[in-house]
Amino acid sequence: MTDIAGTSQHIVVVESAFDVRVLRDIVGDEPALLLEIVAYFDTVATGMRAGLLRAAADADAGGAAMLAHSLKSSARSVGALPLGVLCAELEEHGEAGRSDMVAPLVGDVVDAIDAALAAMRCWRGAQAPAAGQMTGYGS
């Protein structure tokens, strides 16, 4: 969409994928620490994204459940709450051996990872000048 209303709606969707207030409540309001944690999550989630896609391609319900479990708590802690919800759902279906649900749910989780990382990268870009040079994590 190119109209202002469409743009505003897109921004709302991206922002709802990541709420930095959740992370601030856990670790405090130290900008450099927040940036470091979010950058590290970017690196970890990017790797797990690739693993989830492999698990879906292999119809590996157990592997998808294990990755979803690992990502679930981290996502919730950094403020990627929609991602955490989807990871919990994928974990539940994967542990139940529901291979038929793995691929569609992995697609949803991957979309949520992409949305959360896009929002985090946008937030990091806006914060980086104020916080100084970032650490070596992430992209």
Image: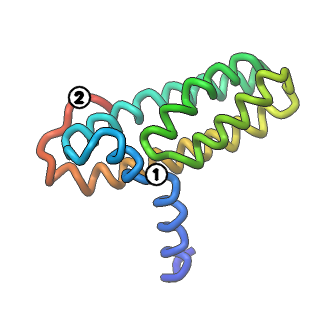
Mark carried by residue 18: 1
Q: Position of residue 53 (x, y in %)?
A: 66, 28
Q: CA distance from mark 2 to mark 1?
A: 22 Å
Q: Are marks 2 and 1 in contact (CB under 8 Å)?
A: no
The residue closer to the viewer here, 61 or 114, is 61
Per the image, the residue denoted by label 2 is 136
In front of the other: label 2 or label 1?
Answer: 1
Q: Residue at x 13, y 40 (%)?
A: 133
The secondary element bearing badge 2 is classed as loop
Q: Which mark is residue 110?
A: none
Q: Is residue 100 above or below residue 18?
A: above
The amino acid type of the residue labelled 2 equals Gly
From what the image shows, is residue 44 above or below residue 109? above
Where is the N terminus found, in terms of image quarters? bottom right
Q: Secondary structure at mark 1?
A: loop
Say how many tags the image has.
Answer: 2
Name the residue at 41% across, 33% down: 41
**What residue is shown at x 67% (from left), y 22% (from top)?**
54
- In the rendered structure, the answer to whether residue 37 lies left or right of residue 91 reads left
| Relative image position of residue 104 (x, y in whole percent) | 78, 39
69 on left or right of 28:
right
Mark 2 or mark 1, earlier in chain: 1
The image quadrant where one finds the C terminus is top left
Residue type at mark 1 is: Phe
User: How far across and how far down the image is residue 134, in percent?
Assistant: 19, 38
For residue 46, above or below residue 34: above
Quadrant in the rendering for residue 58: top right
Closer to us: 25 or 93: 25
**x%, y% of residue 6?**
55, 77
